Amino acid sequence: MFKKLAAAAALLAMAGAASAATLYTTGVIDFNKTAKGSYLGKLGAAVPVTVLQKQGKQSRVRISGWALADYPSMIFAEPGVRIEYGSFDEESAVKTNLKAGEKVVQDNKWVKATAEGWVETAKLTGDLNGLWKQGKARHAQACSMCHAAPKPDHFTANQWASALPEKGGRTGHTRAGANAVMFKYLQAHAKK
Protein backbone atom coordinates (compact mmCIF):
# COMPACT_ATOMS: atom_id res chain seq x y z
CA MET A 1 0.00 0.00 0.00
CA PHE A 2 2.79 2.43 0.92
CA LYS A 3 4.51 1.84 -2.45
CA LYS A 4 1.27 2.65 -4.32
CA LEU A 5 0.79 5.88 -2.36
CA ALA A 6 4.41 6.90 -2.93
CA ALA A 7 4.08 6.18 -6.66
CA ALA A 8 0.85 8.18 -6.86
CA ALA A 9 2.45 11.09 -5.00
CA ALA A 10 5.44 11.00 -7.37
CA LEU A 11 3.14 11.06 -10.40
CA LEU A 12 1.20 14.01 -8.99
CA ALA A 13 4.45 15.90 -8.31
CA MET A 14 5.66 15.23 -11.86
CA ALA A 15 2.31 16.36 -13.30
CA GLY A 16 2.48 19.58 -11.26
CA ALA A 17 6.03 20.27 -12.44
CA ALA A 18 5.08 19.54 -16.04
CA SER A 19 2.15 21.96 -15.86
CA ALA A 20 4.40 24.89 -14.88
CA ALA A 21 4.74 26.76 -18.17
CA THR A 22 7.70 28.90 -19.19
CA LEU A 23 6.59 32.12 -20.83
CA TYR A 24 8.34 35.41 -21.67
CA THR A 25 7.55 39.01 -20.81
CA THR A 26 6.44 41.05 -23.84
CA GLY A 27 8.02 44.25 -22.53
CA VAL A 28 8.99 45.89 -19.27
CA ILE A 29 6.26 45.01 -16.77
CA ASP A 30 5.36 45.59 -13.13
CA PHE A 31 6.06 42.80 -10.66
CA ASN A 32 3.77 42.79 -7.61
CA LYS A 33 3.61 41.04 -4.26
CA THR A 34 -0.08 40.10 -4.66
CA ALA A 35 -2.52 39.67 -7.54
CA LYS A 36 -4.11 42.99 -6.52
CA GLY A 37 -0.89 45.00 -6.37
CA SER A 38 1.77 45.93 -3.79
CA TYR A 39 4.60 46.87 -6.16
CA LEU A 40 7.87 44.95 -5.79
CA GLY A 41 9.72 46.01 -8.93
CA LYS A 42 9.96 45.56 -12.70
CA LEU A 43 10.78 42.68 -15.02
CA GLY A 44 12.58 43.41 -18.26
CA ALA A 45 11.47 42.43 -21.76
CA ALA A 46 11.83 38.83 -22.98
CA VAL A 47 12.50 37.51 -19.48
CA PRO A 48 11.73 33.80 -19.04
CA VAL A 49 9.24 33.23 -16.24
CA THR A 50 7.77 30.07 -14.81
CA VAL A 51 4.03 30.39 -14.32
CA LEU A 52 3.10 29.04 -10.89
CA GLN A 53 -0.55 30.07 -10.62
CA LYS A 54 -3.24 32.05 -12.42
CA GLN A 55 -5.90 34.19 -10.79
CA GLY A 56 -8.20 36.23 -13.01
CA LYS A 57 -6.04 38.41 -15.29
CA GLN A 58 -2.92 37.89 -13.17
CA SER A 59 -0.27 35.17 -13.08
CA ARG A 60 2.05 34.34 -10.21
CA VAL A 61 5.48 33.76 -11.73
CA ARG A 62 9.02 32.92 -10.72
CA ILE A 63 12.13 34.30 -12.34
CA SER A 64 15.48 32.61 -11.85
CA GLY A 65 18.98 33.85 -12.49
CA TRP A 66 21.94 35.37 -10.67
CA ALA A 67 22.32 38.21 -8.17
CA LEU A 68 25.29 39.92 -6.62
CA ALA A 69 25.68 38.44 -3.14
CA ASP A 70 26.25 41.90 -1.63
CA TYR A 71 23.44 43.61 -3.57
CA PRO A 72 20.61 41.15 -4.17
CA SER A 73 18.00 43.58 -5.47
CA MET A 74 18.52 42.71 -9.14
CA ILE A 75 18.48 39.40 -10.99
CA PHE A 76 20.57 38.87 -14.13
CA ALA A 77 20.69 36.07 -16.70
CA GLU A 78 24.33 35.20 -15.97
CA PRO A 79 27.01 36.24 -13.50
CA GLY A 80 28.94 39.28 -14.71
CA VAL A 81 26.76 39.77 -17.80
CA ARG A 82 24.47 42.81 -17.78
CA ILE A 83 21.39 41.05 -19.13
CA GLU A 84 18.93 42.21 -16.49
CA TYR A 85 15.89 40.09 -15.71
CA GLY A 86 14.42 42.05 -12.82
CA SER A 87 15.01 45.04 -10.59
CA PHE A 88 13.31 45.19 -7.20
CA ASP A 89 12.58 47.93 -4.69
CA GLU A 90 13.02 45.53 -1.81
CA GLU A 91 16.01 43.23 -1.46
CA SER A 92 13.70 40.83 0.39
CA ALA A 93 11.90 40.15 -2.93
CA VAL A 94 14.99 38.26 -4.13
CA LYS A 95 15.74 34.88 -2.58
CA THR A 96 19.36 33.80 -2.90
CA ASN A 97 20.50 30.20 -2.66
CA LEU A 98 24.19 29.70 -1.97
CA LYS A 99 23.77 25.92 -2.17
CA ALA A 100 22.38 26.16 -5.74
CA GLY A 101 25.50 27.85 -7.04
CA GLU A 102 27.91 30.71 -6.69
CA LYS A 103 30.56 32.19 -8.97
CA VAL A 104 33.14 34.93 -8.63
CA VAL A 105 33.46 37.27 -11.61
CA GLN A 106 35.90 40.21 -11.44
CA ASP A 107 36.10 39.89 -7.64
CA ASN A 108 32.29 40.02 -7.32
CA LYS A 109 30.49 37.07 -5.75
CA TRP A 110 27.35 36.03 -7.64
CA VAL A 111 24.73 33.61 -6.29
CA LYS A 112 21.76 31.81 -7.77
CA ALA A 113 18.60 33.80 -7.11
CA THR A 114 14.84 33.71 -7.63
CA ALA A 115 11.90 36.05 -7.13
CA GLU A 116 8.19 35.27 -7.11
CA GLY A 117 5.41 37.72 -7.75
CA TRP A 118 2.37 38.63 -9.81
CA VAL A 119 2.22 40.04 -13.35
CA GLU A 120 -0.49 40.69 -15.93
CA THR A 121 -1.07 37.46 -17.84
CA ALA A 122 -1.74 39.43 -21.06
CA LYS A 123 1.87 40.66 -20.95
CA LEU A 124 3.29 37.14 -21.25
CA THR A 125 3.86 35.09 -24.39
CA GLY A 126 5.15 31.65 -25.30
CA ASP A 127 6.51 32.97 -28.61
CA LEU A 128 10.13 33.94 -27.95
CA ASN A 129 10.91 33.83 -31.68
CA GLY A 130 8.11 36.35 -32.25
CA LEU A 131 9.74 38.67 -29.70
CA TRP A 132 13.11 38.27 -31.47
CA LYS A 133 11.48 39.12 -34.83
CA GLN A 134 9.96 42.22 -33.24
CA GLY A 135 13.35 43.21 -31.76
CA LYS A 136 15.15 42.61 -35.05
CA ALA A 137 12.61 44.74 -36.96
CA ARG A 138 12.88 47.59 -34.44
CA HIS A 139 16.69 47.41 -34.62
CA ALA A 140 16.58 47.68 -38.42
CA GLN A 141 14.22 50.65 -38.14
CA ALA A 142 15.77 52.57 -35.23
CA CYS A 143 19.43 51.94 -35.95
CA SER A 144 19.59 52.48 -39.68
CA MET A 145 18.16 56.00 -39.90
CA CYS A 146 21.61 57.63 -39.62
CA HIS A 147 23.99 54.73 -40.32
CA ALA A 148 24.07 51.06 -41.13
CA ALA A 149 22.68 49.13 -38.18
CA PRO A 150 25.45 47.13 -36.50
CA LYS A 151 24.87 43.40 -36.38
CA PRO A 152 23.86 42.08 -32.96
CA ASP A 153 27.14 40.17 -32.65
CA HIS A 154 29.14 43.35 -33.28
CA PHE A 155 29.14 43.94 -29.48
CA THR A 156 29.00 41.80 -26.34
CA ALA A 157 25.89 41.92 -24.15
CA ASN A 158 27.73 44.24 -21.74
CA GLN A 159 28.80 46.53 -24.60
CA TRP A 160 25.19 46.78 -25.80
CA ALA A 161 24.23 47.81 -22.24
CA SER A 162 26.67 50.71 -22.58
CA ALA A 163 25.68 51.56 -26.16
CA LEU A 164 21.97 51.73 -25.28
CA PRO A 165 21.77 53.13 -21.77
CA GLU A 166 18.54 53.23 -19.82
CA LYS A 167 18.16 57.01 -20.05
CA GLY A 168 19.65 57.63 -23.47
CA GLY A 169 23.13 58.71 -24.30
CA ARG A 170 25.06 60.21 -27.14
CA THR A 171 23.01 58.17 -29.64
CA GLY A 172 19.69 59.35 -28.26
CA HIS A 173 18.46 55.74 -28.27
CA THR A 174 17.45 54.10 -25.03
CA ARG A 175 16.51 50.60 -24.01
CA ALA A 176 13.12 51.72 -22.73
CA GLY A 177 9.64 51.78 -24.29
CA ALA A 178 9.53 50.49 -27.86
CA ASN A 179 13.24 49.64 -27.67
CA ALA A 180 12.98 47.26 -24.68
CA VAL A 181 12.52 44.12 -26.81
CA MET A 182 15.12 45.37 -29.33
CA PHE A 183 17.64 45.83 -26.53
CA LYS A 184 17.06 42.31 -25.18
CA TYR A 185 17.24 40.90 -28.75
CA LEU A 186 20.63 42.58 -29.24
CA GLN A 187 21.95 41.25 -25.96
CA ALA A 188 20.63 37.72 -26.55
CA HIS A 189 22.31 37.62 -29.97
CA ALA A 190 25.49 39.44 -28.94
CA LYS A 191 29.09 38.36 -29.36
CA LYS A 192 30.08 35.82 -26.70
Image (cartoon, rainbow, N blue to C red):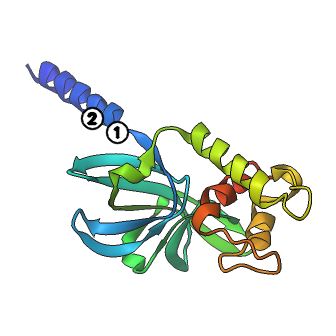
Disc ID at residue 20? 1
Q: Which residue is mark 2?
A: 16
For the residue carrying disc 1, how many other residues have a C-alpha within 10 Å: few (<14), some (14-19), or many (20+)? Answer: some
Above or below, 21 against 123 in this view is above
- 178 or 105, which lies in front? 178
- Residue 19 vertical position relative to residue 84 in the rendered view, above or below: above
Where 77 falls versus 3 (above or below)? below
Number of marks in the rendered image? 2
Q: Quadrant of the N terminus?
A: top left
Q: Seen from this angle, which residue lies furthest front? A: 145
Position of 56 with respect to 30 (left or right) is: left
**Of 102 and 130, the residue lying toward us:** 130
Q: Extreme left residue here?
A: 1
Residue 133 in sight: yes
- Residue 68 locus on image (x, y percent): 58, 73
Q: Horizontally, is 41 left or right of 16 in the view?
A: right
